[in-house]
Image: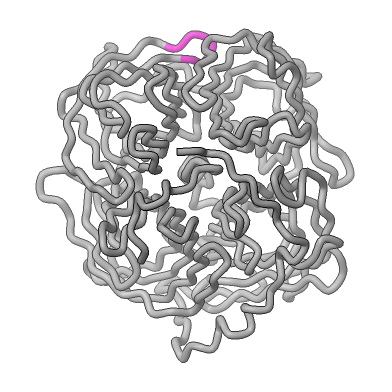
Amino acid sequence: MSLRNRLVLPMALFSLAALAGCGSSSNKATPPPTGGFSNSNLKGTYVFSIIGSDTAGNLLELTGTLTADGNGSVSSGTFDMNNPNGLGVGLVTASSGSTYHVTVDGRGIATVKTSLGTFGFDFVLTSSEHGQITEFDTGGTGSGTLDLQATVSQTDIEKSYALSLTGIDGGLNPMASLAGFTLDGAGTMSNGVQDINDSTTILDLLTLDGSVLVGTAGAPGTAQLVTSTTLGTLTFDVYPIDANHLKFIETDGVAALAGDAFPQLTSVPVGTNVFTAAGVDFVAGVPFVAGGFIVTDGTGNVSSTSSEDLNDGGTVTTGIGFAGLYTAPANGRSTLTLTGFNNASLSGTTIFAAYPSTGGLQLLEIDANGITSGVAMLQSSTTLASGQGYGLNLTGVNPNGEEDDIAEFTNTNGSFSGLVDFNDLGTLNGNRSFTGTYTADSTNSGRGQITSSSFNLISYVVDNSTSVFVEVDTNPNPQVGLGAFQLQNASAKSNLAARHLAALRLKPGVRPAKGALKRR
């Protein structure tokens, strides 16, 4: 299977012609039990990031800021775009006439006008500070997060970070990287180390130098990552959410990478760690997702009670057991060696670089047997709250290409009811009924099955506000996907952490092999 996409995106990208009919359904939004949302819940400057694809299947990354006035107008915005085989790479500025509307259930639509055309965004707020967002127009699709931005100075980021990046290389092949570094008060890096998986070509334990500088007067900051590899110096724009969460997007055209930096932790979390991961099955030529539990004991062992659920191009296998070993971190980097873990291409021993951070244990496969990346988060709750509203985001791949969905629902004793918006590679279908049931697993605490009118999932409770999931839809309607749902509270300002969606996305640039999945 070729992983290269050669089609060029026409300038008609971002047309919103199909949006007119998306709200024509008679379904009516209802407020979550904690109270209703309105335009006033989106007020201030928000950092957003989206990774997905245009309608030709080319990688599309957007990272930047949008400023909302609380009354339905987007007063300003600046964001970087990586669409290397389409419109290109560059900085985009929002123009006058950009608007948004938030419905009572926390879902919303933003229409952002720029010199390149109009971008449509669909989102669901979980608080006034955080939401989940998708591109929602006929030019492409993608998923990400939306977070209220705090003021960050150069000295605020004087600490050690773990940086996770995904995207494609200059040949349009899937690529992912993890890095750890310490910043001084001037933004200069020390103690830098980096691992790169470039479509199974492994560059590990690289010495990393460079810098991270915050922006001024609303402009993004900049970063340089310097290694001794043929990649040379990679340049990024940096958008801080706060001093503990920085968004990166590459701007040099050498590769197209984007991701998140979080403060380092000094040890691998001990206990049950919920994980989700995504990658490529190079044997079958299809994408895959996996989720489950990595159980660590604090002395370097991964317990045999660890388990994995796998969706390999629409073939689902559940309850895969594995065990292994992990090392103590050095310069923020550990290794995780798992026996029995299935990376879709090879079931045997899988080795991950593992970088502990406040955003979770960042994972990248470094054994040359595949390209898998993801995140594991220490589990602190196993129960899904009833009588609460949730915002949901799913990103996946089906025979048509990429699909990204936003939903809001209320959980009533395991019965879900709400609304969902679909973007199936530019085919838009909004405001549709979302109903389903949640059945808790009796043997794996925190694991549950979700059967719904829209998609079927296996979910894993992380904490009292967040669950992550993998999609397990098979033939005749296969889709490989993952995502998260998070508790809503319109009045709360900091009850949710954006980190849970940081690495929950399929590897961009990967499309299903012809005939690998049957058409829906």
Report x, y in % for residue 315: 25, 48
Report x, y in % for residue 388: 36, 67
Quarter of the image where one finds residue 386: bottom left
| Left or right of 116 in this view: 265 | left
Q: Is residue 345 magenta?
A: no
Work out whether 420 lies above or below 369.
Answer: below
Quarter of the image where one finds residue 518: bottom left
Residue 158 visible here: yes
Work out whether 474 lies above or below 422.
Answer: above
Q: Quadrant of the N terminus?
A: top left
The residue sitting at 63% across, 37% down in the picture is 258
| Left or right of 472 in this view: 425 | right
Tell me which colouring the rendered structure shows.
one colour
Is the magenta region chiefly helix, strand or loop? Answer: loop
Work out whether 396 lies above or below 310.
Answer: below
Q: Quadrant of the C terminus?
A: bottom left
Camera-side residue of 175 and 388: 175
| Left or right of 104 in this view: 240 | right
The residue sitting at 48% across, 69% down in the picture is 422
Report x, y in % for residue 344: 30, 34
Residue furthest out toward the left:
442
Residue 145 visible here: no
Work out whether 265 lies above or below 35.
Answer: above
User: Number of callouts in the render?
Assistant: 0
Report x, y in % for residue 453: 30, 73
Camera-side residue of 405 and 75: 405
Residue bounds of the magenta highlight: 329-333
The residue sitting at 54% across, 43% down in the picture is 508
Quarter of the image where one finds residue 437: bottom left
